[in-house]
Amino acid sequence: MCHLAGGELEQIQFLLGHASVETTERYLGCKQKLSHAVNDNLGRHLTGLLTPSGLLSNLVVGGSTSEWPVIRPGSETSWSCDASRCIEIQVKTSKALSSTMQPRRSVSYTVIQEKLKARKVIVLDGPMNSELVRRGIRWCKHGLVTDTAAVEQLHREYLNAGADVVRTNTFQLNRLTYLNVFRNPEHQALIGAPGLRELVPQLLKTAMRLIRQARIKAMKSDTVAIAGMLSPLQHCFRPDLAPAEKAARREHGFMARIFAEEKADFLIAESMNTIREAKGALAAGRAAGLPVWVSFVLGPERELLSGEPLAQALKAMEKGGAEAVLVSNAPPEDISSTLPRLKSIARIPYGGCAHIGKFSPPSWKFDFFPRFEETEMWPPERYASEARKWIAGGSTIVGGDCGTGPEHIAAVSAAASTGEAAGGGH
């Protein structure tokens, strides 16, 4: 039940202890690795010492909700529990822990934090997908199988252009990317190419390997942070297809754990188009032990693409523990007119990334070429001029989205080096 509700496996195992070993191994396919857990005596006598965020709640014994014990944060409660009579245990720890625990912080991410505290401008890199396609790379498996040299080279160019943060080449990469073209997993297994089920974890690890190599070769391992990129599980311009929060947390959690294992410095939940999926991705990233930034796609109304208010989204992200919020994947003028609204209400660092040109969708999903046309209307100097407005308005994080390239990031980096962001906001 905890797992289906979006609870992280490690937290479930910790709470239930070794008494749950057969259940977790049988239903979740995982081995217990605990030497000690707080509830090893579950089923006999259970004593819970509650933290300020709460540990266990809503223990239903005998099927009557009137028999739920009253458990208050900060209290110590002891009771006997016959496991055979327990109909439901609802553990509300996963969300509480993920919103209160402190993520691990690498040396390079600490450098970014210190710059933000000093109101220095952080420069993000530009896009991988549209730039690789512009260079003639066929967008097959994100270029992470046949074109790894080109992927690493582009990362290096962004590093040399002055990016303080580089993002993994994983935009719109998730298990649904490949599952959505089949009826269900069984159909995928029957007619799909060999190895499809294991493909996404392999590609995520390859993406991390390439970006780490690029940073090492640029000799910037201690000064530039690597952001593992999470993105909408469905198309970023289709908020109507966005999953429910729990489903989003489950799927983003799968990827967040891989990024954590592969030593990403933090995560960016990129181009989120609904609050519910952003909340799921944020919680998943924090549960994996990483700091999380969140960016939102803007719609024509300068609110989220879903139509939800940007102020509401910002509030939800701050409450969930996001360490920065951005507006993104919209024309530069839209970013410029939206960022001033964040200055008066944001309590965390904020900023923006714009796309340039016009999106030209692919004719068929199997041959996905994410092209942006008419990008010549926004040469690097013009884009940097717009970025100066963002910085003057208080933005401390600026970068590029689809249609931009290393030249744009170099121009933005030069603009950012001329001064600090204006005061206000956080």
Image (cartoon, rainbow, N blue to C red):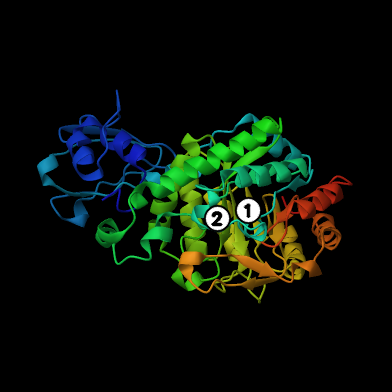
Whole-percent x and y of residue 375?
75, 67
Inspect the image, locate mark 2, and give the three-letter code of the amino acid beneath it: Phe
Inspect the image, locate mark 1, and give the three-letter code of the amino acid beneath it: Met
SS category of the residue bearing label 1: loop
Which residue is the extreme one toward the bottom? 301
Would you say residue 147 is visible in this rendering?
yes
Report the front residue among 346 and 267. 267
> Could you tell me which residue is drawn at 25 percent across and 43 percent down?
28
The image quadrant that residue 383 belongs to is: bottom right
Work out whether 144 lies above or below 181: above
Work out whether 232 lies above or below 374: above
Residue that label 2 marks: 171
Which residue is the extreme one toward the right? 418
Sooner in the amino-acid sequence: mark 2 or mark 1: 1
Report the front residue among 71 and 423. 423
> Could you tell me which residue is drawn at 77 percent across and 66 percent down?
336
SS category of the residue bearing label 2: loop
Residue that label 1 marks: 128
Report the front residue among 353 and 191. 191
The mark found on residue 339 in the picture is none
User: What's the distance in space between the residues labelled 2 and 1, CA to CA?
Assistant: 8 Å
Whole-percent x and y of residue 266?
58, 41
Q: Does residue 182 appear to the left or right of 281 in the view shown?
A: left
Whole-percent x and y of residue 227?
60, 44
The image quadrant that residue 105 belongs to is: top right
Whole-percent x and y of residue 359?
64, 71
Marks 2 & 1, CB-CB < 8 Å contact = yes
Work out whether 411 lies above or below 271: above
> Could you tell me which residue is drawn at 34 percent across and 48 percent down?
195
